[in-house]
């Protein structure tokens, strides 16, 4: 984690327990920079799922950026999306991973995601200090989960992390329920990206937003409208 650039967070993909959940059972900081996805009224009575992943940009001066991305989908329509995503892999490639892809592949992945026209939201936490990554994640989750519930999301899938970090996430979810920022109607679970291709979507969306902020707007342009919410991590 000592280098500058967009990196995977500590603990990602090391957890071997893909099914940890929290079933027990505001105002979003910042303003969206792009058009918003469907509101709860527009979504109607559908019970939607959201798939969430993160990306970080660490800097020497501790002024980095933490991104928490979510893509929303009707669970009844997820299987065709999974098959499409699997079809984008190289032979013997276990999963799509934005930071491991070359630029032409990133463009193809972004274009394929754009064709799905799925609602996407990215919460951007700033500043990010090297020793404050979990605080930044918590601040972004505090903004993201109420926003997802407002979009009629009833189940959120986070990428699995180490057991201790998953427990930390679930305690945060319980705290948000206690503060009535979210209701018992939204459930939070974890899954491994090696087993759940839907998690490849927020990985790519976070990567495209990060690239856009670094002066490479072409990938985000291919994906299309993404709601961006900026929050302070202080």
Image (cartoon, rainbow, N blue to C red):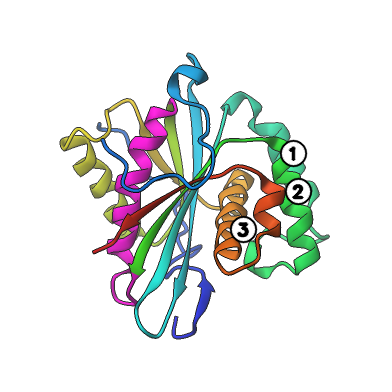
Q: Is residue 185 magenta?
A: no
**Label 3 packing within 10 angstroms: few (<14), some (14-19), many (20+):** many
**Marks 2 & 1, CB-CB < 8 Å contact:** yes
Residue 92: percent from left, percent from top: 79, 62
**Marks 3 & 1, CB-CB < 8 Å contact:** no
SS under mark 2: helix
Residue 103: percent from left, percent from top: 75, 67
- Going from the N terminus, do you reach mark 2 or mark 3 first? 2
Residue 119 visible, this angle: yes
Q: Is residue 143 magenta?
A: yes
How far apart in space, not on screen, are marks 2 and 3 (Cα)? 11 Å
Viewer-proximal residue, 123 or 96?
Answer: 123
Q: Which label number is shown at residue 111? A: 2
**Vertically, is 105 above or below 30?**
below
Residue 109: percent from left, percent from top: 74, 53
How far apart in space, not on screen, are marks 2 and 1 (Cα)? 6 Å
> Which residue is disc 1 drawn over?
115
How would you classify the magenta stretch by its main secondary structure?
helix
Where, quadrant-wise, is the C terminus in this rendering?
bottom left
Q: Which label number is shown at residue 201? A: none
> Which residue is disc 3 drawn over?
208
Residue 95 visible, this angle: no
Residue sitting at x 79%, y 54%: 108
Query: Where does the magenta region start and end?
Result: 128-152
Viewer-proximal residue, 135 or 194?
Answer: 135
């Amino acid at each position: 984690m000592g280098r500058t650039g967009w990196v995977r967070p500590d603990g990602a993909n090391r957890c071997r327990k893909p099914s940890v959940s929290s079933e027990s059972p505001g105002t979003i900081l910042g303003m969206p920079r792009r058009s918003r996805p469907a509101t709860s009224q527009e979504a109607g009575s559908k019970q939607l799922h959201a798939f969430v992943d993160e990306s970080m940009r660490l800097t020497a001066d501790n002024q980095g950026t933490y991104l928490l991305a979510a893509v929303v989908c009707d669970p009844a329509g997820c299987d065709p999306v999974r098959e499409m995503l699997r079809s984008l892999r190289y032979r013997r490639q276990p999963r799509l991973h934005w930071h491991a892809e070359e630029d032409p592949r990133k463009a193809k992945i972004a274009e394929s995601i754009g064709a799905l026209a799925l609602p996407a939201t990215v919460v951007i936490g700033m500043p990010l200090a090297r020793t404050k990554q979990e605080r930044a994640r918590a601040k972004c989750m505090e903004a993201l989960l109420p926003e997802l519930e407002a979009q009629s999301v009833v189940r959120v899938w986070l990428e699995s992390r180490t057991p201790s970090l998953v427990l930390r996430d679930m305690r945060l979810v319980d705290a948000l329920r206690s503060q009535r920022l979210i209701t018992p109607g939204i459930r939070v679970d974890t899954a491994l990206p090696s087993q759940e291709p839907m998690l490849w979507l927020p990985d790519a969306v976070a990567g495209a937003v990060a690239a856009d902020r670094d002066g490479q707007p072409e990938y985000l342009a291919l994906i299309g409208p993404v709601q961006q919410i900026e929050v302070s991590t202080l």
